[in-house]
Structures are given as structure tokens and as C-alpha cells.
Amino acid sequence: MGRFSPRSLLLGLAAPLGALAFAVLVCAVILGVTGHSPLDTVDAMVSAAQRPRTFVNSLNSATTYYLAAVAVAIGFKMKLFNIGVDGQYRLAAMLSAALAGATFMEGLPSFLRVALTVVAAMLVGAGWAGVAALLKVTRGVSEVISTIMLNAIATYLVSYLLNPARLAEDRPGSNNVGTRPIDGGGQVAGLEIPGSSSQLFGLVFLAALVGFGYWFVLARTRFGFELKATGLSESAAVASGVSVKKMVLVSMLLSGAVAGLVGMPQLLGSSYSYSLDFPPGIGFIGIAVALLGRNHPVGMALAALLWGFLDNSSNSLDVAGVPREIVGIMQGVIVLSVVVAYELVRRYRVRAEQRDVGTALGRTKTAEEASA
Amino acid sequence: MRRMRGLRLAAGALALGLGLTACGGSDSGTGSGGSTQASTPASELKIGLAYDIGGRGDQSFNDSAARGLDKAKSEFGVDIKELEAAAGETDAQKEDRLRQLAEGGYTTVIAVGYAYATALAKVAPDYAEVKFALIDSTDAKGANIENLVFAEQEGSFLVGVAAALKSTTGKLGFVGGVNTPLIQKFEVGFTAGAKAAKPDATVEVKYLTQPPDFTGFNDPAKGETAANGMFDAGVDVVYAAAGGSGNGVFKAAKAKGKLGIGVDSDQYNLPALAEVKDVIMTSMIKKVDTAVYDFIVSVKDGKFTAGEKVYDLKAGGVDYSTSGGKVDDIKAQIDDYKAKISSGEIKVSSTK
């Protein structure tokens, strides 16, 4: 009951908002010291926010960031650090792009093609994460180390496969190399937004669905309960009959499957091919977004929107003569201060709860004494 | 209680969604206002330049484009705006960058690097009055796009000849920044040149990073390690087609008393490389600066032509440098190959 009191709500918001305010302050100081007006920066950002194109691009970026954050959060809930979301989504996007672009797919109905592509991506992502999971449950290898290494292996594997002799097609004169483009039947149509030249990714609904699934599984199923229990206390989970090894395996596979989805909105909604300029590094953004959103389905959505907006406002800053690097600084400071702020709020909350328990116990005693 | 929480979250999400949609809808007017402004003719030449990752100051490809721009600016006092790509961005962000330039009234826009091809293909048709240049790619074509491409393999062939003639061990090295089709053209040309001059010459090849990790263009430590490994294995000339990482290659060459070959600019004359310049025997020059300058002049004079413009050896778009005098003794032989390539007698393939 106490969890939903105004105080707990305020405390929940205090950390992210405090961190945001602190980050803004730090950025203002940095801008001031380097001779740029913080007000001009705010002005540029506001005018960026008012442009429909920036709005759509931010939402599109947020879609991929959100999927990455959910993939990371599934692991976080179990104290598993899946640093490998990056490698998982890149490998999944590359292989499913090759599949979706293949000639034999062109005869299939559109829905089936898209479904096959998405399922293939999830399987590849889960498979790649599964390697780390197997190493952990059979050999006790830390998933932090193995997933980082698997990222590097994925990079080399993708480079090897992205060759005209293998899964890529030759594009003379372009200096780029990529898989065969997916034709109309394999694409997911975007949503037209008035005033914007970019379309909203059709797969934004997939991200929303994944977010809902994440909330439902964690809050409404026995599996979700066991997952959280294992994360909170492994020994207590074991004592109540949970197989920790099974939980590690299943949650890593789930995390990898969601990671496999990360590249899908971009692949099926905009790029239509995995080439050298397919956006890398989203897995790491996912870690930051999950941290900022406290692994909460709505919190992460807000964090992803913030991240997406910051990334997409940097062009406007550049045009206004404000160094675009300020965006990177702001993102870094937000993550750093959010971690500190959560710890401060946690300590305050523990103290407040102890105080509550103290007063409550005191009152009970007096009641007992009164009855005695 | 639990159910209520779920409802509250759903309501929150809905409210957020509505808020955002409202935001998008009400502001569509501003966007169209921006594009009307773009169609106002500018009295002077306004030039926008969109760099690839690294931007001005990368001591390599982007800097070369910047030199061309600077030359135009000092000669005709044009109004310029330079924007830069961030690592890991999407095509949408590149597209936005080009659109912001076009909307800001920059009627001459230069996109530096093949990564802009997809974005430019979408942007160019919407701004018929803007003249675009795309460097290193023919992937985006249009009535208002000029594709500026280079024959890197031909220039690399010449420095390959020079390397083979200067080597005493017959073992040569190639350090590529990132393993992309573009850098592979440098490797293929270099190897072909070396084999042409000395059929038994061998070339050891090392790429510093694999895409999408593009740090190989700006990691001197990696360049130094790779070059040291080659020198220890008996290699005595290394061609560094690795942007800023070339610095490390030259450092290793200096420490071991070997030779290096520069890329893109005449690196012997770069102030940032003054300490190691005595090991730079020659450089493969890719004249991005000339291409950028020529493009600006063509727009200024109203002589813009759409389509592919090849900067090969014959057109003087690629070349080898002689600064430092280290190749003076073999200049006649290199120039002989140069004449044969220019005349078409020798065809240098760009792929393996």
C-alpha cells in the first residue's frame, strides 16, 4: 500500500528529474566556459523540437533505443549484464536482411515475409545470447566478459559475411557494400506525418507491444516473479524451488530475442538493406536508456524519447553554431548523475522507511501496554 | 491495487502519446515556413558542407575537402556552413543534415563521403534549385547531383611501384584503416603496382578495424602496432591508407629506420607530421580539395553539370608526391608507369 503514496511517487521521480536538472546545469556551465550562450542552445533545441521532421526522427530513434533498453532490462532484472545486445542486434539485422532480401522470398505474401524476417532476427539474437548463457550455466563464465567478446566476434563475422562473394551484393561505384535490398513486399510501411519528410516507423507498434509484454511477464506471470526473485536474492530463490540455471538460460535467450528486434524498425522501415552505414552502437545506448528508465516499461520509453530527441537535435545545434558534442556531454552526465541520484534516493528511502517502521512499532507497543 | 497501477501506467502512456501527437500536429506550419524561406534566391553563393565522421581536423579525407572549401572562401568570399556527422547515426540524421542546409538557403551543398548516398537520393529531388555534390559515390544520381569519384587504385599503383623499387627485402606492407570496399581499392592498386615493378615482391596486408568500427581511421596506436609487426617480419616499406592512424605507422618506421608512404594529402608537408616526415618517402594524393574547389567554381560560373565526374590519374585527380626528394632517383620509372596508365595502356583494376 505504502508503495503508491505520494511520497514514493515523488521519490521515484526525484532521481531522474534531479539528474536531468543537474546535467542541464553542467552543460550550461560548459557552454558558458567555452563561450557559447546556453540560451541560444535552448533556443536551438526548442526550434528543433518544433520541426515535425525532428519529432518523427526522434520517435523513430526512440523506437530502436526502447527495444534495446528492454533487451538490456530483462537481464538487469536478474542481475545479468547483457553487454552483448550490440553484437546480437547487428548479427541478427545482417542475417535477417540477407534472408528478407533473398530472391526466393519475393513470391511470399507480404505479411509472411515480414513475420519470417522478424522471427529470424529474434532467433539469431537469442542464439548469439544463448552462447553466453550456455557458457555461464555450464562453465560459470561471467556473462559480462563473454558478451563483450561475442560483440567483437559478431563484428568480424558480419564483416566476413558482408562480402559480394558471400551474403552481400556488388554495388559498383558506391564504395558501400550491403545485402540485397528488400523489395516492397518485404518492407513495413511507415506512417505519414503531416509536415515531415520522414515517415514514422510502422514497427513503432512492435516496440509498444514488446514493452507491454515485458511489463506483463514481469508483473503478471509466475516466470516474471521467479525472474525478479532470482535477481533480488539467488539463495532465497533456490530455497523456494527456482532453478537458477534455467532462469539464467531463459532470461538470456529472451534478452537476446528482443535484442534481435532492435534493428528491425530501421531495416524494414528505412534502410531495407544491411550495409556499412547501418547504425551501430544501439546496444550500448540501450544500457544507458535502461539505467535512466530504471528498467521500468514506461520509464524506459520516456528515457528513449529523451535520448532520441537529444540525438536528433544535434544537427540543429550544429546549424546554430553550438558544438554538437554538447549532446554527448549531456547524455554522459545524465547517465552518471542518474546512477548517483538513484543511490542517494535509495538511501533516503531506506532511512524514511526505517523511521516509519520505528514509529509504527512504537505505537503498537503502547497499544499492547494499554491492553495489558 | 496492482490493477490500478497498471491502469495508471496505461493512462500515463496515453497522455504522453496524445501530447506528442499534438506537438507534431501543431508545429507542421513551422516546417513548411522553413522550406519557403529556402526558395528565396540568395544574392551571394551560400555553400553548405556536410562532413563524414571526424569532420574538419581529421588530418585526412575531411580536411582535404575543407581545404577546397577554404580556398574557395578566400578567393571569392563565399558564405559557408559546415556540419559534421556523428558516429553511429542513421540515414535519417544524415538526411536531416542535408535538408537543414537546403532549408537554410545553402544552394550549393557538398556531401563528403559515400555514407551520404542514401540520404542524398531522398533529399535532392525535393530541392531542385540546390546543386549537390557527392564525394566518393555514384549511388545517388539526379539532375542536381554531381558525383565526384576518384581512381584511388591508379594513384596507389604508382606508390606501389615506388615501394617495390625502394625495398631491399622485396617485402612490402599495407596498413588499411577500415576494411571497406573503398580502402580495398588502395590495397589492390598498391599490390598491382608493386608486382608490376618487381614480380616477386610480396605485400603483407593488415586492416586495423572492421566496419562498423571506424576507429581504424583515427587510432595511431593501432597503426604503430600493425607496422611494427610488419617491420619485424622483414617488411621495409609500409603504405598507410589509414587516415589519422598513419601517424603511428610513420612513428614505427622512424623508430626502426624503415620507410612509410602517406595517403590523401602530401603528408610530408603536413605540420602535424613534421616529426616523422623524413620517413615519408612519398604520398598517394587524392585531390578531394581540387574536386570540391572545381565544383564550387562550376556552380559560381553557372557551369554545373550533373552526373559522374571521375578524378583519375589522367585528369590529375590522383597522383604521387615528390616532396622530400626520396623518390627523385626512381622518378623516371614511376612517371613511365604514370604515362602508361594515363594513356590506357595499363588498366588498373579496382577490385581483387
Image (cartoon, coloured by chain):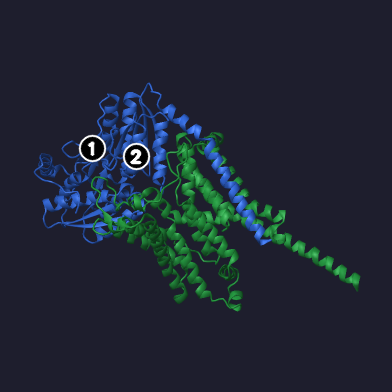
Residue B288 on image: x %, y %: 27, 38
Tell me the SS state at disc 2. helix
Q: Which residue is mark 2?
A: B120
Label 1, residues with CA under 10 Å away: few <14, some 14-19, many ≥20: some
**Image height of A359 relative to B327, above or below:** below
Q: What is the chain letter for disc 1?
A: B
Q: What is the chain letter for disc 2?
A: B
Quadrant location of the N terminus of chain A in the rendered image: bottom right
Residue A291 seen by the camera = yes
Q: Which residue is mark 1?
A: B308
Chain A drawn colour? green
Compare residues A27 and A193 and report the one nearer the observer: A193
Badge 1 vs badge 2, beta-carbon distance below 8 Å: no
If you read the primary sequence from the N terminus, does the residue marked by circle 1 or circle 2 appear first? 2
B182 relative position to A220: left or right: left
Residue B59 seen by the camera = no
- Residue depicted at x 65% and y 57%: B5
